[in-house]
């Protein structure tokens, strides 16, 4: 029998303060995973930088790395950890979402998806087995199941059929992962597998799906297909309904979410894993987070502002540089400007999660959340 | 009487091993100044990084900073050192070269140059006094005289008239610098001024000009207008002829040069200050320096290469990352790829200068140069 890897240390309402023991170290949750899609965080951020800004888990993408440089290349180089020089946990997204959002002409069949690479138009087939094989080659800490993420505008009939197929795919993912983890030359034979709940905005479909996948005894469960166009209230409502139907003794991951406020709301609803491109994408556009709202550093009013982005912030940008300097860099299109903003934003998110964990540890999450949300008032 | 700031510690033939004491610290020469035109080294390199890669002197540009963010802004923020957070020496180029190479429609008059900003087309006037005022606002350690850099294809008559004007401009620069350094609210009242020798490929004009400016007792002397299209042999020949006509008890700066081989040849000819955009520009294109030639990391052959760019190199890229990873980053257009290559290349240049200084200290520069050039054989 496998040792219990996920331990809940504290709860407050539905909110969970937990830890997940992995072969690459223990993850303290709630956690925000830092997105490095193509084995690098955009904005010239290295894995050395990630250590400096308190990153626990790096997140890379199966589809992107399969297309370039090729998971066979990464496998030959000893896996993703060795390739990008990162010894802490890595979660790999399954590629399902990217196949549906990025790739060219695609055809979904029971066996998987036929599509064209967005890089060179090359024809690719990816099904549950292929996704698991790629993720096994990458040797990430946590692999995500291969799913379909139906459009939020899809009909009920389409979504039902899609979710049913995703459930069948999940069984195939689990079997293939077990097979791969049993092979002697698999790099990470303790790779974990998280399943993904889908069902668009159809609550009953999502609940039935959550119940079905909960029986499959996976290492963790994600809620996918949210933050794709629905309102925040719809998203919170889905979480209210669905999270209780996922195993409470397993990690709960809300994919691709979100703003600091979204994260606080979702933690309250029992979510403990997050990822989102907002902090790095916003940073590259000079939009930086503070406890009192987001600043646009392109704004003229920062021209002579000698303060750091946020007073007291311990990030590498705030420890050294002024708003005026960073604004100049952004205006002059110096890459350093983007880099400093991305470092600040990721630090901000990582630090927010640390505060959330502290608040949960001390049984004051509810107050902390209220205070924090009041501060974010202007933040979107 | 002013204390002697420039001390020659050792010579070997014409090669000089010296130090220049400045208000921002002592510069050990020969030195390669790292180019950060708009108050940042391109490739997302920060001043914190510069300390890690052994940079002694940062070089920024008068014209660029006047246009954006404005030298008035930088003055209000306490000068360039405080703005970019760099406490070691900074040399500011005078803007002369950029006015002639970058700016739109320009008109050269005795008083100075009328031209249009390359950023917004705004009309600007810059003469010797304006250049000194801007550089005084920037408060760099070393200011460069405002000169005209005539085209290498200019006629003898044009060059003679241009050089004569540059000499008159130099006298005005010197007077204005003295005035500015005497003002109580000048940020750096110990700002140094280097004059610039011009004369295109006309040896006799260059020599007469060198003799004329040598009499003006400046803090240092540069040879400008080289590496703008002439052959390496022509450049070395000009140095052979001109450097002996510049004061030997002052720093000698060869502007905008060059390859590692150029630097070794110029050190032998008595030059001790250098700057060039090659290492950062090449780095951004994935071209990296090694003792055995330049590598193009885009090359397929590095796909599975687990070695660092150069074995034994102490730069932040080589201490952690493989050629295979950096190649992937470059191919995937991840900014981190450029950043790592730029860090490596600047470290390579800074380290080369350190080796040159050691060789001069130990009286074996001539052998060192021969060995090094043999190694660089393939390097262009």
Image (cartoon, coloured by chain):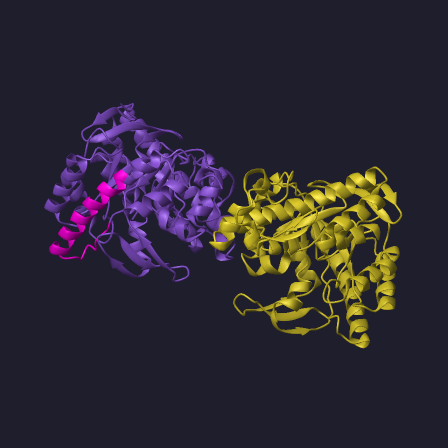
Chain colours: A yellow, B purple
User: Image check: B250 left or right of A364?
Assistant: left
Where is the N terminus of chain B found, in terms of image quarters? top left
Residue B307 visible in the current orientation: no
Query: Going 41% across and 45% down the picture, which residue do you hit?
Result: B36
Q: Residue at x 59, y 42 (%)?
A: A308
- The answer to whether residue A368 of the structure is visible from this angle is yes
Residue B168 at x, y = what percent?
19, 45
- Main SS, magenta region, reads helix
| Foreground of the two, B370 or B355 | B355
Report the residue at 76% width, 74% height from top: A154
Does the segment drawn in magenta span residue B88?
Answer: no
Residue B171 sits inside the magenta stretch: yes
Q: Is residue A228 above or below residue B296?
A: below
Observer-nearest residue: B265 or A317?
A317
x and y, in percent, of residue A50 in the image: 61, 43
| Residue at position x 59%, y 57% in the image | A65
Q: In this view of the protein, which residue sits in the foreground, B279 or B326? A: B279
Q: Is residue A125 left or right of residue B354?
A: right
In the image, residue A180 above or below residue B139: below
Magenta region: which residues?
B148-175
Q: Quadrant of residue B237?
A: top left
Measured from the top left, where is residue A204 in percent x and y? Answer: 88, 67
């Amino acid at each position: 029998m496998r040792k219990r890897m996920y331990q809940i240390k504290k709860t407050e309402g539905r909110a969970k303060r937990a830890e997940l023991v992995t072969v690459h170290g223990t993850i303290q949750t709630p956690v925000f995973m830092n997105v490095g899609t193509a084995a690098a965080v955009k904005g010239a951020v290295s894995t050395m930088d990630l250590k400096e800004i308190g990153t626990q888990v790096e997140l890379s993408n199966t589809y992107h790395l399969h297309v370039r440089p090729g998971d066979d290349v990464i496998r030959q180089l000893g896996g993703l950890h060795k390739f990008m020089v990162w010894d802490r946990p890595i979660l790999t997204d399954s590629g399902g979402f990217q196949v549906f959002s990025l790739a060219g002409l695609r055809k979904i069949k029971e066996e998987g998806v036929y599509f064209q690479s967005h890089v060179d138009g090359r024809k690719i087939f990816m099904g549950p087995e292929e996704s698991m094989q790629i993720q096994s080659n990458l040797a990430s800490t946590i692999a995500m199941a291969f799913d379909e993420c139906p459009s939020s505008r899809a009909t009920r009939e389409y979504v039902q059929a899609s979710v049913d197929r995703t459930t069948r795919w999940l069984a195939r993912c689990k079997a293939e992962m077990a097979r791969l983890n049993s092979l002697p030359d698999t790099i990470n034979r303790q790779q974990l597998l998280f399943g993904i709940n889908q069902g668009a905005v159809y609550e009953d479909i999502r609940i039935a799906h959550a119940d079905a996948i909960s029986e499959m005894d996976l290492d963790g469960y994600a809620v996918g297909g949210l933050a794709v166009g629905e309102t925040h209230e719809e998203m919170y409502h889905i979480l209210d309904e669905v999270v209780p139907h996922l195993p409470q003794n397993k990690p709960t991951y809300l994919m691709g979410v979100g703003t600091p406020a979204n994260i606080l709301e979702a933690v309250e609803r029992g979510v403990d894993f997050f990822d989102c491109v907002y902090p790095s994408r916003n940073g590259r556009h000079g939009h930086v987070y503070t406890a009192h709202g987001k600043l646009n550093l392109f704004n003229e009013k920062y021209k002579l502002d000698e303060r750091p982005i946020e007073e007291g912030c311990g990030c590498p940008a705030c420890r050294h540089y002024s708003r005026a300097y960073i604004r100049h860099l952004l205006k002059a299109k110096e890459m350093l400007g983007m880099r400093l903003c991305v470092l600040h934003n990721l630090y901000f998110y990582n630090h927010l999660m640390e505060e959330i964990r502290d608040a949960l540890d001390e049984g004051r999450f509810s107050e902390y959340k209220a205070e924090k949300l009041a501060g974010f008032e202007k933040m979107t």
